[in-house]
Image (cartoon, grey):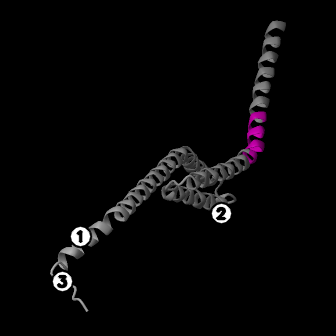
Amino acid sequence: MRAQSECYMDGQVQRRKIALAVILVLLTSLAVTPLVRAQSATQTQADLGQAYAAVLNAEQSGGNVTALVAKLDSAIALVQQANLLNSTDPTRAQSLYAQASTLAQQVISSAPAVAAAGRASVLDAQIELGIETAVLAALAVLAYLFVPRLFWRYWSRTHSDWRVKKP
């Protein structure tokens, strides 16, 4: 009989332990949810800052950052919407923060390619400017050497019938 009561007591203790564990998990999740939400908003703000820095770097490298700026603007608009909804609909706000963070990460990942394309474009423009300058210099030298000859040859042909009278 004693074994049955001990088994019964062990079953009650186990149920109580399970119930206590479930209650602790629920309380912990309720206490942590605002922290996770705040971390998500903070993380999204940090991602937006990194994305802005990446866009700025790409622009300074001469890249065409129009598409990156459009994505960054969209992410900022999502964060503004999430900030408005944060107190009324936290789940929707969390979703908007996640979308904004995803957009910011896309901007961060594509910014180096835009910067590289910008650097290549700047290099091409510098090479083109050097070639144009060299061609213009060569044309100036050729003009200096050959224009006087051509001018006098043409002048002498057009004025070959002129005669100088003696005074």
Look at label 1 and name its amino acid. Answer: Arg
Q: Quadrant of residue 143?
A: bottom left
Q: Residue furthest left?
A: 161
Whole-percent x, y for residue 96 in the image: 59, 53
Q: Is residue 39 visible?
A: yes
Which residue: 81% across, 21% down? 13
Which residue: 63% across, 62% down? 80
Q: Residue furthest front?
A: 167
Which residue: 64% across, 52% down? 53
Callout 3 secondary element: loop
The residue identified by callout 1 is 153
**What crowding class fits label 1: few (fewer than 14 Cα within 10 Å), some (14-19), or many (20 or more)?**
few
Q: Please tell me whether residue 76 belongs to the stretch shown in magenta.
A: no
Look at label 3 and name its amino acid. Answer: Trp
For the residue pair 92 and 123, the one nearer the viewer reads as: 123
For the residue pair 140 and 97, the one nearer the viewer reads as: 140
Q: Please tell me whether residue 25 belongs to the stretch shown in magenta.
A: yes
Residue extent of the magenta highlight: 24-35
Q: Are marks 3 and 1 in contact (CB under 8 Å)?
A: no
**What crowding class fits label 2: few (fewer than 14 Cα within 10 Å), some (14-19), or many (20 or more)?**
few
Residue 84, numbered circle = 2
Asked if residue 45 lies left or right of residue 13, the reply is: left
Which tag, 3 or 1, sits closer to the chain's start?
A: 1
For the residue pair 8 and 20, the one nearer the viewer reads as: 20
Look at label 2 and name its amino acid. Answer: Leu
Up-down: is 109 above or below 144?
Answer: above
The quarter of the image holding the N terminus is top right
Callout 2 secondary element: helix
Asked if residue 155 lies left or right of residue 89, the reply is: left
The residue identified by callout 3 is 162
